[in-house]
């Protein structure tokens, strides 16, 4: 059976995550502490400062827990046929595929979190139960042209990103048209949208300083919903910051490729 292991992104964090793996790999946890400048074990297990709310600390914490969870599972099972990750989770997929070592991964997500955490002025809105094409038509007819589809998480769930007043207008239009249900997300900026272009450009320059290899296991890229081709890890990671996460298309591609078993690797829920 063809198997994919996938890693969650921001939103999966919780106090207490990583209890099964953090003490299993003390050397790697020590590397993370040195890079980050604070004890990641205490952050994950007890919510110690800087905590699990700010994207600048959440992203490294999730990377560490997900990466160690991969290592633990890899000791018990054969490697999967494919890897995937939602937004931040894609970094764990690339680590698992041998594109960079653990310490490099921590540096990458620390810088990514810093740049994304610096962005301000906007938000994100989940629209549940709406057909994406009808939603796009509704926004067009309402003259709302400054919001972007940031995530497509399922056949009928789209996340919009943009200025908060425009998201409010979009929510009213959806409600008036009885197209779906809207849920504002508790985020500090319009991630995965045109408004992150400056952060993406700065991150691209940072990525040029790191050694990134091609995946040894196929990894589905959020930007293209297809496996990473040779020589494009840096480009697609930079683009990911300001591009939509095409999760539904990614999962659809895997189904078409014959994947029959899907395993989510990460903190989970108690």
Image (spheres, rainbow, N blue to C red):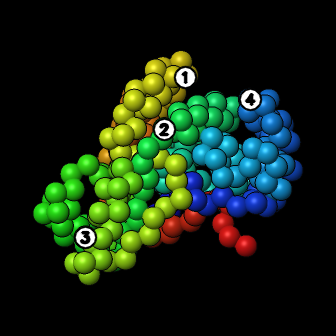
Residue lying at the far top of the rendered structure: 209
User: Who's the residue at 31% across and 56% down the image?
Assistant: 166
Pointers 3 and 1 in contact (C-beta within 8 Å): no
Q: Say whether residue 41 is left or right of residue 243.
A: right
**In the rendered image, which residue does mark 2 sit on?**
119
**x, y (%) of residue 186?**
53, 59
Q: How far from the left and from the top, in percent, is residue 177? A: 22, 78
User: Circles 2 and 3: CB distance less than 8 Å?
Assistant: no
Q: Are marks 1 and 4 in contact (CB under 8 Å)?
A: no
| Mark toward the start of the polypeptide (3 vs 4) | 4
Instruction: State the CA–CA distance, disc 1 to disc 4.
Output: 17 Å
Mark 2–mark 4 Cα distance, whole angstroms, equals 23 Å
The furthest residue to the left: 141
In the rendered view, tell whether residue 246 sits above or below residue 133.
above
The reply, left or right, for residue 230 in relation to residue 33 is left
Which of the two discs, 2 and 3, labels the residue nearer the N terminus? 2
Quadrant where the image shows the C terminus: bottom right
Q: Nearer the viewer, mark 3 or mark 4?
A: 3
Q: Which residue is mark 1?
A: 211
User: Can residue 155 be seen?
Assistant: no
How far apart in space, not on screen, are marks 2 and 1 (Cα)? 26 Å
SS at mark 1? Answer: loop
Q: Which image quarter: residue 237?
A: top left
Query: Which mark is first along the chain, 1 or 2?
Result: 2
> Residue 47 lies in what quarter of the image?
bottom right
Question: Spatial distance from mark 3 to mark 4, Cα to Cα?
Answer: 46 Å
**Label 3: which residue?**
173
Distance between mark 2 and mark 3 Cα atoms: 27 Å
Residue situated in front as seen by the camera: 119 or 66 = 119
- Residue 106 in the figure: left or right of residue 170: right
């Amino acid at each position: 059976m063809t198997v994919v292991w996938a890693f969650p992104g921001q939103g999966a964090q919780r106090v207490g995550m990583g209890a099964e793996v953090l003490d299993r790999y003390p050397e790697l946890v020590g590397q993370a502490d040195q890079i980050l400048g604070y004890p990641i074990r205490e952050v994950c297990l007890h919510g110690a400062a800087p905590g699990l709310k700010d994207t600048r600390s959440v992203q490294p914490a999730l990377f560490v827990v997900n990466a160690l969870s991969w290592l633990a599972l890899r000791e018990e099972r054969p490697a999967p046929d494919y890897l995937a990750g939602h937004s931040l989770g894609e970094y764990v997929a690339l680590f698992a595929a041998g594109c960079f070592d653990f310490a490099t991964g921590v540096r990458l997500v620390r810088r990514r979190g810093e740049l994304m955490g610096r962005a301000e002025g906007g938000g994100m809105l989940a629209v549940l139960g709406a057909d994406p094409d009808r939603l796009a038509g509704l926004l067009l007819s309402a003259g709302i042209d400054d919001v972007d589809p940031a995530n497509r998480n399922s056949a009928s769930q789209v996340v919009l990103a943009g200025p908060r007043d425009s998201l409010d207008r979009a929510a009213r239009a959806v409600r008036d048209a009885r197209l779906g249900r809207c849920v504002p997300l508790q985020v500090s900026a319009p991630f995965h949208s045109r408004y992150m272009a400056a952060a993406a450009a700065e991150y691209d320059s940072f990525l040029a300083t790191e050694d990134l290899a091609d995946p040894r296991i196929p990894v589905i890229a959020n930007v293209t919903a297809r496996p990473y081709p040779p020589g494009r890890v840096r480009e697609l990671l930079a683009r990911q910051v300001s591009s939509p996460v095409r999760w539904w298309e990614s999962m659809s591609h895997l189904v078409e490729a014959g994947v029959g078993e899907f395993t989510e690797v990460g903190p989970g829920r108690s």
